[in-house]
Image: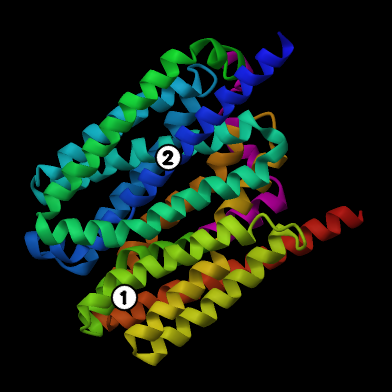
Amino acid sequence: MIIKADLNKHNFIFGLISLIFLVVFLYGIFTQAIGTLITRIIGYYGISMAQAGLLSSFLSAGNFVAIFTVTVFTGRINKVILLGASLLLFAISQCLISAALPFSILLVCFALVGVFGATIDTLTNSIIADIQPDNINRNMSLLHGFYSLGGLCGPVAIEHLADALSWTQVYFIMSLAFFVYLIIYMIFVRWQWSSLSIHMSSEKQARFGFFDMIKFFTQKRHILLWTALFFYSGNQRTLVVWIKRYVEIHLNITVWGAYALSAMWLGIAISRLLIAPNKRMSSALKICFGNLISAIALAAGLLSGSAQVIVAATLMVGLSSGLTIPLIVAMCCGWHQGKTALGTLMPYMAMYISNVLFPPFSGFVSDFLGISWGVSVGAVSSFLAAVFSGLLYLNLKDSRGN
């Protein structure tokens, strides 16, 4: 009986983790849609780059709203059920985008996608941290590695779809993919409900409130971690939104645009799957050196004026700094083992705010100084991420010394 119970638990954990990895992979593909389709969207609506950056900003503003959604419902509704509801609303929101509504309404649709997408992202991280707390570093790296694989496949897959279909039809196909996934997810939840009730019960999912979020910023290590991720996200989001357009418009080499974006995600996937789990160096130090290398590589690529060098540079950006998010989330969840949703949400808050600010800011810089200067905002952000993660390393080292 004990062997059978252990086998059932193993099957349940394996099945749930596999489904979580799959949806994160799909979500990784979806997040590349703006950067891949941005030129087509600009042409369709006849808007400036700064206006186009608002699409990403509204999506990220929706991400920020998700902070309140997760705070209110975590611990009150089982995370597995909340994830299913978020998947449904996420797929519906993508359908609304595919309707090609007036630009002002389109911004609202992107905000809705941001709300439910960020809820999915936060809950998947929290569930992974809850289900196997002893393997949090490895599982978090694998989780974000699958997201990166989606990011790697996304630009090329979406570009090929967009060559045959309109950008609106591409969004519709992505919504169908999430509807199909939701059906599979619901079947698994119904089949494994007894195991879910034991291992993912609402009683075991600690609640947290806005006081906990405010208290988070009373510790220096939290502030340094938060700020490092803020600037890392500024670099990543700038490249996700603009690097393809930089290669297509500024360098006038259309065929290399999607490859420049995919190269970054290839590097990120390798970084998260192979480099991040390595324990021979502290997480904060790996983040520091990685972001410093990223800043140098991106600056060199922009100065070269070569599409091939840009692709190599974005690959190096991904390889060196792609481990930043999973390592930071793993550190924060380790500091808040009783409240992994809080440990996931607070670093993500830095990402959401950064993702709101950097696309229109870099687009504004591009409109007035040229797109090279707009993309260089990412290099500056990466350098600042290196500075603050270095300070985090020193702070943690001093704490251990005391």
* Amino acid type indicated by mark 2: Leu
Q: Position of residue 221 (x, y in %)?
A: 71, 52
Q: Residue beneath label 1, please?
A: 365
Q: CA distance from mark 2 to mark 1?
A: 37 Å
Tell me: residue 105, above or below residue 158. Answer: above
Identify the residue at horizontal 16%, vertical 68% (top origin). 48
- For the question of whether residue 214 can be seen, the reply is yes
- For the question of whether residue 227 can be seen, the reply is no
* Amino acid type indicated by mark 1: Val
Identify the residue at horizontal 49%, vertical 33% (top origin). 123
Identify the residue at horizontal 84%, vertical 54% (top origin). 399
Q: Which residues are magenta?
A: 202-230
Q: Residue beneath label 2, please?
A: 22
Sequence order check, earlier mark of 2 and 1:
2
In the image as oriented, which residue stretches furthest toward the right?
402
Q: Position of residue 287 (x, y in %)?
A: 64, 64
Residue 260 located left or right of residue 316 = left
Q: How is the image coloured?
A: rainbow
Helix, strand or loop at disc 2? helix
Where's the N terminus, which quadrant? top right
Say which quarter of the image contains residue 374.
bottom left
Q: Position of residue 148 (x, y in %)?
A: 45, 55
Q: Nearer the viewer, residue 158 or 229?
A: 158
